[in-house]
Amino acid sequence: MLRDIQDKILKAKKEKDYCIIAHTYQAREICEVADYVGDSFQLAVSATKAPQKNILLCGVRFMAETAKILNPDKNVYIANKLAGCPMAEQMDRPYIEKMKEFYKGYTVVAYINTTAELKTVCDVCVTSSSAVKIVSKLPNKNILFIPDKNLGSYVASQLPDKHIVTLDGCCPIHAAITRRDTEEAKKEHPNALLLVHPECRKEVLELADFIGSTSAIMEYAKKSDHKEFIIGTENSIVEHLQYDEPEKQFYPLSKKFLCPNMKITTLMDVYNAIVHDSGYPIELDEDTIVKARKCIDEMIRLG
Ligand code: 13P
Ligand code: SF4
């Protein structure tokens, strides 16, 4: 039954000239029908390469907006319109404009988890996999990093020569994980390596054996000779790794590690979007596209 639905998606995708781009947090059955699966940086790069005239994004809204900004002449859809990222919506443009006045002369670095509107007033975007590299290449010592204070503080710890100011934003899912959760998981699995996402709090990162983006965590676990891993990011990564590496053991750092926005898209949403053309179109005005694109192009150039 599941396979039938997947086959119909694959057939309609070809006939209707769709490219399916899925974030690593998407369900297994969605990743299986996607043309590209990856972390936020890889999704943005793959959006620039897709030859199809229609793009269906399975992930959250800021990812679909990024694909639209990079492909203004294509039809870009999100599979489930309820899928937003709460962190991306934590700060609005007037607030950042005020902060820019306050931190005059600072380079404004936006985590890609921001709305298209917010990107229009920033200098460069970064993702979790490219943030350290990109910030290290910026000529300015003074950086205003928005919105994720945890990623910002991780970047600051890696680049002591930079003066990085963060504001009070974060991912509610990653930031909910505490040192105590982490210590308990380590106690339960004393032989496991701990791999965590830099959206986690400093107190969690301090206990990690490896810190990286969703794709970097997967790559590290696959290449490692180690047999057991505690995964400090959304629990879908635990499931993917367990399928990909059945001889290794993967444990969730916490059962709290579930992003409802990433989980809201189902295979049937993908089916309906492609077979019944019910995907939700991403529309952005030209001014927003032009201004936000500078920030994303700069990320791809430096990343
Ligand atoms: P990645 O770029 O590491 O995939 O992160 C995206 C995200 O939303 C993590 O919460
Ligand atoms: Fe946004 Fe956090 Fe969900 Fe990632 S895990 S999409 S940052 S709310």
Image: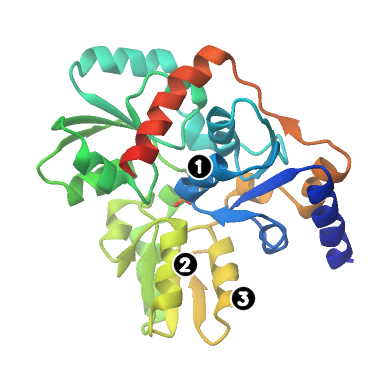
Q: Is residue 160 left or right of residue 252?
A: left
Q: Is residue 105 above or below residue 219?
A: above
Q: Is residue 237 above or below residue 133?
A: below
| Residue type marked 3 | Tyr
Report the residue marked by disc 3: 243
Dot 3, crowdedness within 10 Å: few (<14), some or many (≥20)?
A: few
Residue 68 horizontal/vertical position (percent): 59, 30
Q: Secondary structure at mark 3?
A: helix
Q: Is residue 247 left or right of residue 189?
A: right
Q: Image quadrant for the N terminus?
A: bottom right
Report the residue marked by disc 2: 218
Report the residue marked by disc 1: 44
Q: Secondary structure at mark 2?
A: helix
Q: Image quadrant for the C terminus?
A: top left
* Quadrant of the image occupied by residue 178: bottom left
- From the image, state whether disc 1 or disc 2 is nearer to you: 1
Confirm or deny contact between disc 2 and disc 3 (CB under 8 A): no
Residue 269 horizontal/vertical position (percent): 79, 46
Residue 25 appears in view: no
- From the image, state whether disc 3 or disc 1 is nearer to you: 1
Residue 298 horizontal/vertical position (percent): 35, 32
Q: Which mark is first along the chain, 3 or 2?
A: 2
